[in-house]
Amino acid sequence: MASFRARQGRRAAGLALLVSMAMPVPALLAQEANILQAPAGMEPMRQPAPSSDGPQRIVPPGYGATTPASGLSSPDMRAVSPAAPSQLFPTGRQSSEPAVRMLSAVPGGERSDIQIGTLSGVDTSSVGLIGVQEGSLGTAMWEGASRADIETYLMRLPVASGSPVMDDLARRLLLTGARAPEGAGGGIPLLAARLNRLLAAGQAEAAMQLALAGGANRSPLVAVELARASLAAGDDNRACAALADIPPGNDPARNDMAAFAVKLSAYCQIVAGNPEIANLTLDLAREEGLNDALFFSLAGQAAAGIQLRAPEPNTLGIVDAAFYRLAGRDLPDNVAEIAEPALLPGLLRDGTLSDAVRLAVAERAARYDLIDGLELATYYRMPSFTEEQMAGLLTSDIPETSPLRRAMIHQAIGTAVAADDRIRLFKLAFATAESAGLYYPTIEALHGELGGMTPSEALRPMAASATRAFLALGEPRKADEWFALMQSAPGLGRDGRELAALMRVAGGTAAGFDSERVSAEIIADLRSGERKAQVFAACEAMLLDALGHSPTPAVWEALLDARGALPGDAPSEALLNQLQMAGHKKAVGETVLLTLDVLGSNGPGAAHPRAAAQATASLKAANLESEARRLALEALLARSYAGRG
């Protein structure tokens, strides 16, 4: 009788052979030398736990030491739409091309050309998709940075923070082509890490184009991410072609890459019209111990029309969704909540989904900054409501937290005429959006309605909400017009105090910066005993200092006395110091990466004020002035209750 080891080896070899049958012949030949073992270091990425060592200080150290030497303005922040794929920095040979070459513009784009640097003797981690005019952080953005540090922070880069400035910086960081950082790393290709974070952010198309820009000589991890991106984008041919660079492995029960290779192989065999081979692949995968009831159910239905029982998924991955489509099975009812972010753009285009489901998908896509507020507005207009439902908006049986209720409010604003009705509906829209994490896309969706309103005495009750909205939209002139309406009445109150502070941070026109007067206001809040006022004042003081507007020393004394004004845990002293030094040496890429890390996945509003302040100071020092101000504004807006609705 054959030994267990021999039987196991034959099953593994058989599985590897079946995996290879989903590949083109040249790719199969290329895999023969290493067909059973996945390469070392290909285990799933794990995020290192953040350090919390060292004493925590209240005021970030060294403020003023990172003041930028020049006031160079940064590129305008805007969503990046990647151009057609191109390998900006070819690998493995000395370049004879000029240092800068011109490529034609993307059809329909605003630019007439893009300047793209050409570097020589660098690896595929240097490829990128955007030029300077699209917000590139520059080909030297990793200069002076440690590769090990960049790998560590890149693999845990936060996405979907709800912060427009963080989403913008993360996208630009991931799409910028730059020389690889120096030093030894941990074995994870930087390109693979970038692709992984793009997919986590829902940017499947950009991830696919970036992977293609890296050329045909791909590492296994890059090939996996290319295959995932291609499946999410609906490109089966490209996904299956990527199998040529993914070792099949011999332990799908315990090795993620081997499991992925088996699932993708079965998928590609079915797509290619080879269900018999796919069934054999499934049988061998079971023998190897792969435990995924949903996969076997979907693959069995797609290959042989047999629907095995399987539990409903708690999350819907990219491969799962591809098999749902291949099997012709309806997606789960809660697909909008459980789908992997990279699937959201495709779900928005799925005409088989109900308006209610597509609306829920659209709101989630807006949280990931995959669509803007204007596109969200088109989904808000899709559902139909009865006259009775619209008339009973405030007493409707539609739950307050439902996307349908927000759609109803949006539609009601478009038909309301009376000033009182419009004020009530706008405030309701802002309040419900804030609680749902949709404030920024909602004010974009309502921009046309807001912009069409002229500040007047009849609209005074809406002045605070409109001022707040236009500040968040980056339109300080409009904000000032509505703020002036508030000032025309006696006594600005708490709303006026906070909105004036927000305008100072944003660079608006409200009173400039009078250190003595502003410091007195901050001190009064810190000594008020009112927790919300104390938290706002503490954050305001630290952000003003980060922007170069130093409050008086008495502010810091009052802050020491109001210890409850800085709740929560600050990042480690070592991490804050590293961020400070990155800004001081104008290491743009490292500054942006560390900024995103210290702020975390919940954005500037939830970050400790020290983290928000140091991130602001370092961005400013690295000549990212407008991004620094936007970050400071977002951090302070989250702590302000003025004009929330």
Image: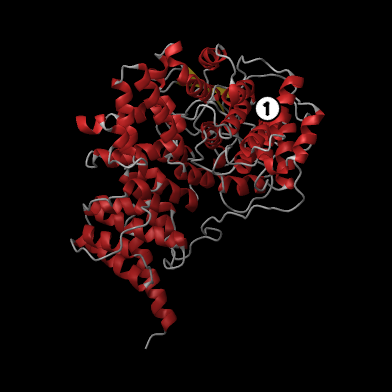
Using the image as rendered, state which of residue 383 and residue 80 is in the foreground: 383
Q: Residues within 10 Å of mark 1 (few under 14, many from 20)?
A: many
The residue furthest front is 490
* Residue 99 seen in this snapshot: no
Q: Quadrant of residue 5?
A: bottom left
Q: Quadrant of residue 110?
A: top left
Q: Is residue 68 left or right of residue 642?
A: right
Identify which amino acid the numbered label 1 is placed on.
Lys
Using the image as rendered, state which of residue 76 and residue 284 is in the foreground: 76
Q: Relative to 395, say whether 260 is above or below.
A: below
Residue 341: % across, % down: 41, 44
Q: How many marks?
A: 1
Using the image as rendered, state which of residue 438 and residue 367 is in the foreground: 438
Residue drawn at x 56%, y 28% as measured from the top left: 136
* Residue 295 seen in this snapshot: yes
Residue 101: % across, % down: 54, 22
Element type where label 1 sits in the image: helix
Q: Relative to 395, say whether 54 is above or below.
A: below
Residue 187: % across, % down: 59, 53
Residue 88: % across, % down: 52, 32
**Can you identify the residue that label 1 sits on?**
620
Q: Quadrant of residue 68?
A: top right
Which color mode does the image show? secondary structure
